[in-house]
Amino acid sequence: MGIAARLYQDGRWTDRHPVEIEATLRDSAWSPLDVVIEDVSPGGFRVVAGADLAIGDKIALGVAGLGTREARVVWGDQGIYGCEFLIPLSSEDLRTAVSAPAASPIAFPKTPLPTPRSTMSEESAESALKDDRLPIRTRVAAIIVSAFLAWVFVFAIGWGVVALVRALLG
């Protein structure tokens, strides 16, 4: 005795092409997210996103060479989502997507880099700064004298301009 089975095929049963394409996804709030497409077919794609997407959300996917394509989130699990293009890719667009260069991962160090330490303690650094400073009265006097000399310079230039104008007109 055998069991008869009938297989049905819907539009999602097309060949999927493994790729690694960097893209920009805009979620339902239209916020841009950097994502990596893992596979693509004429009807949809699987994407790794660092954000939460809700099933049924309409999104937009921007891919270099393909432009922006509207899609809908069909399924999701731990940051990996399956999405369906609202308008399927043409065979030419699919070839362009499949032939795109692979995304190159950024190699981050596994351990934090050591922070360089100063040979001088904080207390000795503060005392060195204090030793280099002039006394407060000397600093205030220097500021007042500098301001006075700046105004003298401004008045001298003004007096010179007035004298020149009188000489030319008079």
Image: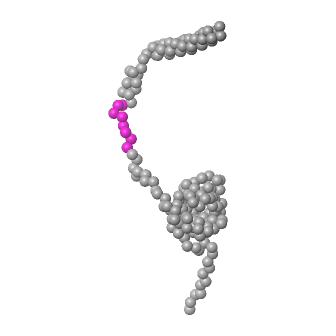
Up the image or down, 39 lies above or below 156; here it is below
Residue 108 falls inside the magenta stretch: no
Quadrant of image for the N terminus: bottom right
Q: Characterize the magenta stretch by its predominant secondary structure.
A: loop
Quadrant of image for the C terminus: top right
Q: Residue at x 57, y 54 (%)?
A: 33
In the displayed orientation, state which residue is furthest to the bottom.
Answer: 1
Q: Residue at x 65, y 66 (%)?
A: 87
Up the image or down, 168 lies above or below 54; here it is above
Q: Position of residue 93 (x, y in %)?
A: 59, 66
In the displayed orientation, state which residue is furthest to the left.
Answer: 119
> Magenta residues, as a range?
114-121
Q: Quadrant of residue 169?
A: top right
Q: Position of residue 85 (x, y in %)?
A: 63, 65
Q: Quadrant of residue 165?
A: top right
Q: Position of residue 55 (x, y in %)?
A: 63, 62
